[in-house]
Amino acid sequence: MIEQALTGHRNYWIWSLALLAMVAGAFYASALQSADGFVHTGMGNNAIWGLYHAQLPFLASIAAASLAVLVPGTLQKYSFLARLAPLAAFLGATASAMSLLFIAADLGMQRRFLTLLLNPSPGAPASWQVPLLLLFLALTLAVGWAQVGAVQKGVKQPAWIRSAVMIAIPAGLALPVISAFMLAVVPGSELWTSPLLAPRLMASGVAAGAGIMLVMAVAAEQLAGFKAGEEALERLAAVAAWAGLGSLVLTGIEAGTVVLGNVTAQTSALGLLYGNSPFASASLFSLLAGAAAIGLLLVPSLRRSSIAAASLGALLAFSVWLQSGLTLILAGQVREGLATVDYAPALPEILLTSGVWAGAVLLITVLLKITASAQLEREGL
Amino acid sequence: MMNNDRRDFIRKAGIGLLAGMGAASGILTGGGFERTTSAAWAVEPGDTGRRWGMLIDTRRCREGCTLCIESCHHTHNVPDVSSPAGTVEWMHKEDGRELLGSACPSTAALPALCNHCAEPSCARACPTDSIFRRTDGIVAIDYHRCVGCRSCMQGCPYGEVSFNWSDPRAALKNPSVDYPTRQRGVVEKCNFCSDRLARGKKPSCVEACPEGAISFGNINNPSSEIRRLLESNQTLQRKPELGTRPSVFYII
């Protein structure tokens, strides 16, 4: 199967090399950071966490979202989703791997990464993050790979896949909850201590994850001859729309509670997102773009056109990334009595972040190509 | 005449009763800000050990004097980083209203340091147990275990944890031999001079203050000097509403 990664058309190679060039940029930035620490980043006492940490809640929720297809596709015999199950598994694996890389990139003492496993502090939500990400990565990668192998050989899936997915369910669901709990230990930060943060991350993550899976499936169909099936694509679009709607409702309930309660600390935190603040334009764009994408995905004719649905899915995922990544982490650091967030990511930070994303897109490309070829090979027989 | 006296008596008795109830339950706050009640130094059931605490009498704190900070930073090799985004501080002076809330009557710059909370949220945030509360109440950091994730900095509502964004050794002009230096990439903060306490000395800021404004002692011990001062003065803590139970108190 792996040999499929090394053969392809000219466009496949151009695409892969472009992504590899971005990965090389990340290696350069990482070397710079290993040598001099965070001095090449925009982080400092005014922004303790920056672009690296801002990826984590989003990626955790995407990893969890892969379960929305993986579970019905493998455990519940929804045959039309079974074809998408390896895609979902690979998305979960990629999101976990990215999270681990961003956690490592954000450590001041990178050579002590193993301390996170060797000296955990179970009372601290943060210490569950790395072990669970490693577990989820191993499970989803193994499940996806075995599923594609079974398709290629035309045999039944190995029985252990069911057990692996069952173990992956609690691990995956825990990821966004831990992301939210890691922020909840910060007293005095109203954006982070909201009890609705974990459910909001989960709902918006399912919406964004379904959006990304739509993009993956449609790209594999258009470029590699993969057949996802109309019914599966429409189901993905519906999951994205309804989960997105749920996330909008939760956001509205939270805002309504804050406005009615009128507690100064809470209203000023809400104002940081939507009032007169540097984060307002990103937050409002995210809200409006997300609402528009969700509204359009609910229109049956648009949902059934695969290109339109994939574009809307991408827009929805981007809006969720802005909301549960960027603004949540950056605005959440502004606290009464402490310095304001004065942050602009520096070039090495941007290189490293975009390099990790490029590496992830490359990994997904290769895995999708392998999945599509396995399917084609089987049907060609 | 008789009637008036009786009315007066009832009124006074009523006020006295209310005040007594208020004091007993610790809700009588008097002014606009939350004064510390005896609950702040109550010994938790099962806690028989020490709880080191500090009391800063800001009435004696001189405007513009930074001797406590200088002594602290020299003793512990705290780097003097010039850029504001990279500052490392164990102790600093801050506007009284920023420190103790808008109702604080003092706008003078008051000394601030780690509160060595009885319920430290920094320790709850640390994934590797590198920042932890000792049995004597001191919240300490293991610089050799810290991975530099800065969760404790986010967790501290007082902003009293610093991160070494750059190499701290390069920013030391006159290093002290009594305490180790740190490396780039780990957090640090006030350790209540646990190193000096182990040698039977008082914290360096306490010794350095020419006005004797800083008292230090075991607040679990009812006969300690700090406990006597806490019980005989009105004191304030930083953000007591967050439930962190700070061990640093202020007399305004």
Image (cartoon, coloured by chain):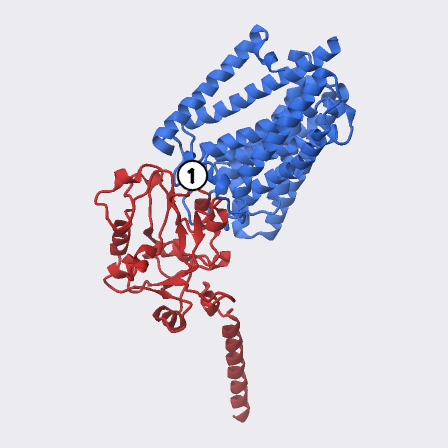
Q: Nearer the viewer, residue A281 or B117?
A: B117
Q: Give x and y (percent) for residue A208.
A: 63, 30
Using residue A369 as the reference point, say whether residue A325 is left or right of it. left
Residue A48 quadrant: top left
- Residue A331 seen from this side: no
Residue picked out by circle 1: A47
Q: Give x and y (percent) for residue B41.
A: 45, 66
Q: Residue at x 62, y 50 (%)?
A: A260
Amino acid at the residue labelled 1: Ala
Q: Give x and y (percent) for residue B184.
A: 34, 38
**Chain that bears disc 1:** A
Q: Secondary structure at mark 1?
A: loop
User: Is residue A127 positioned above or below B104 on the image?
Assistant: above
Point out the residue furthest to the top here.
A10
Q: Nearer the viewer, residue B188 or A166?
A: A166
Q: Quadrant of the C terminus of chain A?
A: top right
- Residue A61 seen from this side: yes
Q: Quadrant of the N terminus of chain A?
A: top right
Visual hue assigned to chain B: red
User: Is residue A49 positioned above or below A73 on the image?
Assistant: below
Q: Nearer the viewer, residue B159 or A168?
A: A168
Q: Residue at x 35, y 29 (%)?
A: A35
Q: Residue at x 56, y 36 (%)?
A: A57
Q: Give x and y (percent) for residue A357.
A: 52, 24
Residue B236 quadrant: bottom left
Crowding at label 1, few (<14), some or many (≥20) Cα neighbours within 10 Å? many
Visual hue assigned to chain A: blue
